[in-house]
Amino acid sequence: MRLRCPSPMLAVALSAALIAAYAPSEARGDTPESYRAKANATQRVSVRLSAQPAMRAMAVSAISVNAPASVNGIVGSFVSITATAGSGDPNSIITISATGSPPGLSFTTNTPTGINPSATLSGNLQPGTAGIWFIRWHASDQFGARDSVITQLTVTSSDQAPVMDQPGDMVVPEGTTADQPLRATDANGDPLSFTRAFGPPFVSVATVNPDSGTATGNVHVAPGFSDAGAYTVQVSVSDGTLSQTRTFSLQVPDVPQPPVPGQPVWERVADLQDPRTGSGVEGAAANLIGNKIYVSHGYRFGDSWLLSVYDVTTGTWTHGGVTAPDARVARSEMAGGQAFGKHYAIGGRTSPNADVEEFDPVAQTWTTRAPMSQARGGLGAASWGNKIYAVGGRSGGTYGSGTIYRLNEVYDPTLNRWTTLAPMPLAVSDNYATIAYAGRVYVFGGASGSSHRSEVQIYDIATNSWSFGAPMRTPRGAAMAGVIGNKIAVFGGYNGLNLRVTELYDPGANMWTTGPDMPFEVSEMAQGVTYDSRGIYSIGSGIFGESGSIVLALRPLISIDAPEAISVDEGQRVTFTVLATHRNGLPVALGAIGLPGGATFTDHGDNTGTLAWTPDFTEAGEHLVTFSADDGQGGTNSATTVITVRNVNRAPVSDPGGPYTAFVGTPLTLDGSRSSDPDGDVLTYQWTFGDGTTGTGATPSHTYAAIGLYGVALQVSDGAATGLATTAVSVVGLFQARAFTAGGNPEVRLNSGRPTWCVQVEPIGRAFSLTLVDPTSLIMRSQGTGSVDQISALIDKALTTVDRDGNGVEELTVCFAKGDLRLLFADLRGTTSVTVTIEGKLFGGGLFRAALDVRVVASGHTVAASISPNPLNPEAVLTFVTLQAGYARVRVYDPAGRLARTLLDEAFVPAGYHDLRIDGLDDSGRKLASGIYFYSIETSFGPARGRFTVLK
C-alpha cells in the first residue's frame, strides 16, 4: 500500500519509549557505554507518525525537591513532615516518594501532578521508635529528571505520668483506724511514691513498694474523738517529675468519747455466730490463753458441748475441727478457769452437774478431771497461782433458783483434787463476775432467789478468810468482770433487765467509779479469764438466748505490749522492748516496778522502753516485772512480764595450793581448801599425789618415800561439773645445821640503834656444802612472837664463810635487818628467851635447819631508848620505842645543860620503834664540841633520859 503524507511535511517523532531507550539518564547513573549497549540490543523501534510539523528537540529541565533538614519528635507525640518539588519545565509531571521513616507514620501526596507537588509523613510516634531516622525524599518527572533530599528525624522518649487506681470512699468512726491499699503503674517503669496531697492530719499515706512500673501504697486513717465529719482526701503518686492525683471522700461518724479522761473504751469485735447451730452462745466457759480465747459449752439453742476458738490477733473464729474439738458433757450457765495454759469448764445447770473438763490447746484434746464436791450451776470461778477457786452457785436450772450455796473450794491440777475452803459470808448464785486479783478472789454481786445483790465479797487466799468491799452502785447478777490496769471492771448483768452499765473498782482505794456504758445490754457472758493487757473480752449476750452473740472488747485507753513470759539462763543477757499505744495519740510515760537487781528499764520518750538485764548466778527462779504507763491526764495501764531465770551449774575451780617442799619420810599436808564453786555447791576432792597413790578431802596428809619432784593433781566436783588443777611437790632431805653467835651471847636488842643482827650457821658432820646454799632462801622463824612468823635474811651483803669458833668447820654469817626483827618479835615485852630456827635451801635440792635460843630485849612498860654507836663515830642513831601513839619530843643538851639540838617535835607519832639520826651538829649547823651530852625523850607514853659522848 502506498502511503500518502497528510501534510506537506512529515515529521517523525520518537515516542516516550524510544526516548527512554536511547536517551542517557543521569538520574539513574547510566554511562555512555551502558547506553550504547542498550541501544545495540534494541531490535525493534516503535515510531509514532504525526501530521504536525516536526519540532526541534528540547533539553530535559532539572527538578528540585525541598524538605526540612531536621525535625525533632517525642515518642507518643504527633509529628508531620512535608516535602515539595518543582521544575523549570511547565510540562513536567512530578512524583514524590519517601523512604527510611519510622513505622506508624502515614504517607500522603498529591502527586503525580504538575501543580504544586507535595508529600507529607505524619502520625503519632510509636513506643520503640526513639532514635535518629534519615528520611529520603525522592522526586522525578516523565522526562526522567530526578532529585532527592534527606530529613533527619530525631525521636526522644517521653516521660509519661503515672496512673493510679481510683481509691474507694471510706467510712471510719472516731477512735478507730482503717487502711486502704493503693496501686499505680508507670509506662516508663519509673519507681513511684505516694503522698497525701490534701486531707485531715489523721490521714497518712505511705509507700509500701515503689517497684519499677507497678507500685503499692497505703492510706491509714486514725480519727480521734474530736474528728467527726465529712472530708475530702487527695492522694498523689509521682515518678519524681510527673504525678497524678486521685480524690476520694472520707466520712468519720461521731463516737461518744469516754466520759472521764483515762477511762477505757468499748469496741465491738468479730461476733460469734456458730455455723453448726446457727446461733450465738450464752452461759459458756471461756479463757484467754496466749492469743486465743477458748469458748466451750454454753447455750447455743440448747445446752452444748461445742468449742469455738477466737484468734485475737486475726479477729477470726474457728468452730469445731481438729483445733476446736467437741467436749464430752453438754451444759451451760457454768464457770471457766485456767491453769498451766489449759482451759477448764466447771459445773453447769444441766442436772446440775459437778463435772470438770480440761482442754489442752497444745495437744488439742479434752480430759475429764476430778468433779467438784457439790453439783452446781450458776457459779463463779477465779484463777490464781495455777489453781482454780469455784464459789457460790445454785441447784436450780434458772437464774437465782433452787438452793443457793456459800461453798468455796479450790482445784489443784497437779493433784487433780478439790479442797473445801472457808465459805462465803453470803450465799449467791449467778455470780459470774468472780475474779482473782493480787492474791484475792473478788465476788461481785450475784443473785439470791429473786434478789439482785450489790455486795463485794473478798476472799484472802493467804489467810483463808473473807471480808467485804465497798458495794457496787448497781445491784446485779449474771455480770462479768475483768482486770484493766489497776482496776477491776464489772460490766453488763441482769436485775430484771439486761444491763449495759460498766463500773470500775479500785481494790487499793476500795472505791467505785463509773465506766463507759457497753454498746448493748448484755448478761450471762462467757465466764472465765477473758482479759489481758490488751483489754477485756465480753462474749455472748442475753439470758434468754440470742441468735447471734455480741463480742465486745473493753480496751484500755493505753495498751501495753510486753511479753507475758520470757526465759533466760543465768549469766545470759536479756533485752526486750515495751510498747505503749495511746488511743488518743498522747505521749505516755513508761516505768517498771519490781526490777531484779542489776536490771535497768529505759523510757525512750517515744512510747517505747527497753528492759535490759544480765541475771547473775544467784538469781535463778521467777521474777515478776510490772510495766506501767501514764498519760498524765488520768489514763494509766500496766502489764506484767514473768522472767524465768534458769539455773546454770558452773564448774568448780580447783586450787591445790603449792608448790610444796617436803622431807623424805615426813608427812606433808596439802591444802586444797581454797578451791571454790561459784554456785556455792559443796565440793568433793580427789588428789593424785604423783607417786602412784591418791587421796581425798580438802587437806590430806601424805608422806613421800623418796627424794624427787612430784606432780600433784586435784580434781574437785560439785556432783555435776568438775575442775582440775595441778601443782608440784619437791621432796628433799633435811640436813642438820648448828647456829651460834660470834660473841657467844645470842642477844637481840630491839631498841638498839644497830641496824642488823647476825648469826653464824655451819653444817653438822659436813652434811652439805655452804657453797650450795641459796642466799635468797635464808629465813628466821619464830612462831607467835610478833606480827609475822618469819623474816628473810639480808642478801645485799656478800655471804662470808669463816671458822670463827675454831672447830675446823667453816660457818656462814647470816644477817637480819633490825626492822624485820622488830616485826618478828613485836609482841614481846621486856627480856624474853625465844627459840628461833634458821633455815635455807640448797641448790639442787635439800633443806637445812638450825635451832638457836636467843634472848630478846624489847621495851617494857616505859619508853626505852638507846644510842649506837656511843661515842659517836662520827654519827649515831638514837632509837626509842613507844607502846602507844601520841606526841613525841626529843632534845639534846650540852654538858652545861643548854639546848643544843631538837631532833623531833611532833604532835603525833605511831606506836613502835623510832630511829633518829645524830649527825654531830647543833641546831645552828655547828659541830658539837667534845664532851658528854644528854638526851631527853618526852612522849604521851612516858619519858626517857640518857647520855652519849662526842669525841674528836
Image: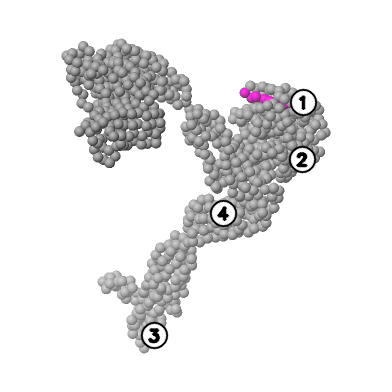
Tag 3 or tag 2, which sits nearer the N-term?
A: 3
Q: Which residue is mark 2?
A: 473
Q: Magenta stretch?
A: 405-414
Say which residue appears at 61% left-offset and 52% top-offset.
221
Picture coordinates of residue 936, whole percent (x, y):
33, 31
The quarter holding residue 700 reads top left
> What's under tag 2, amino acid-wise?
Arg
Q: Considering depth in this image, is 685 or 739 the residue closer to the camera? A: 739
Q: Secondary structure at mark 1?
A: loop
Would you call the spot at circle 2 few (<14 residues within 10 Å), some (14-19), or many (20 or more)? few
Which of discs 2 and 4 lies nearer the camera? The answer is 2
> What's under tag 3, amino acid-wise?
Gln
Would you call the spot at circle 1 few (<14 residues within 10 Å), some (14-19), or many (20 or more)? some
Q: Is residue 750 above or below residue 89?
A: above
Q: Which residue is mark 4?
A: 205
Which of discs 1 and 2 lies nearer the camera? The answer is 2
Q: Considering depth in this image, is 483 or 168 the residue closer to the camera? A: 483
Q: Which mark is residue 351?
A: 1
